[in-house]
Amino acid sequence: MLATTQHIPHRLLVVDDEPTVLFAMSEYLTVRGFRVDTAAELEEALALIAHIDYSAVIADLRLTGTTNTEGLEVVAAVRERSPGTRIVLHSGYGSPELEREALSRNVDVVLHKPTPMARIVDCLTRLLGGAL
């Protein structure tokens, strides 16, 4: 009998308060073989992070109705629970100071919106170790 290797997809969490961004990223990444969970607000993201180990998290910096740096709270929660999880901070409101702050918190990559979906997949491929 031949042994087969079964591909286990990387599990991602996408955190963004824009429904169209969540839908588009989820669909695009799912078609490319990822298992994708989504969260539209900080508390929802923190609840998922507390119970699920993700290969990578893509988090928007700002979420509606909060302090404008909620993405950094997502980063802190991921780093506390799962230090090996790769983190991509995705924002339309970046500044050099904020980017330095994110990188000092061990964010792997900071992307500025709008980012082509293919670039996000290329980034994830590099962060997660090659072919997906």
Image: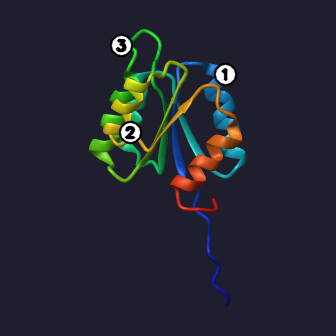
Residue 64 image offset from top left, x and y in percent: 47, 12
- Name which quarter of the figure residue 120 lies in: top right
Q: Residue lying farthest left?
A: 80
Left or right: 120 with respect to 72?
Answer: right
Residue beneath label 2, please? 49
- Find the distance from the CA under tag 2 to the CA under tag 1: 22 Å
Residue at image point 59% right, 62% down:
130
| Mark nearer the viewer, 2 or 1 | 1
Which is more toward the observer, 30 or 102?
A: 102
Instruction: Give the residue pinned by disc 1.
Output: 20
Identify the residue position indicated by label 3 in the image: 67
Q: Is residue 87 above or below residue 128?
A: above
- Residue 34 position, x and y percent, is 62, 49
Mark 1 vs mark 3: give the one in front. 3
Q: Give me the C-alpha separation between circle 2 and circle 3.
A: 20 Å
Whether 61 is drawn above or below 54: the answer is above
Q: Residue furthest top?
A: 65
Neighbor class of circle 2 (other Cα within 10 Å; few <14, some 14-19, many 20+) is some
Q: Which amino acid type corresponds to the residue marked 3 in the rendered image? A: Thr
Disc 1 or 3, which lies upstream in sequence? 1
3D distance between C-alphas at marks 1 and 3: 22 Å
| Residue 43 visible, this angle | no
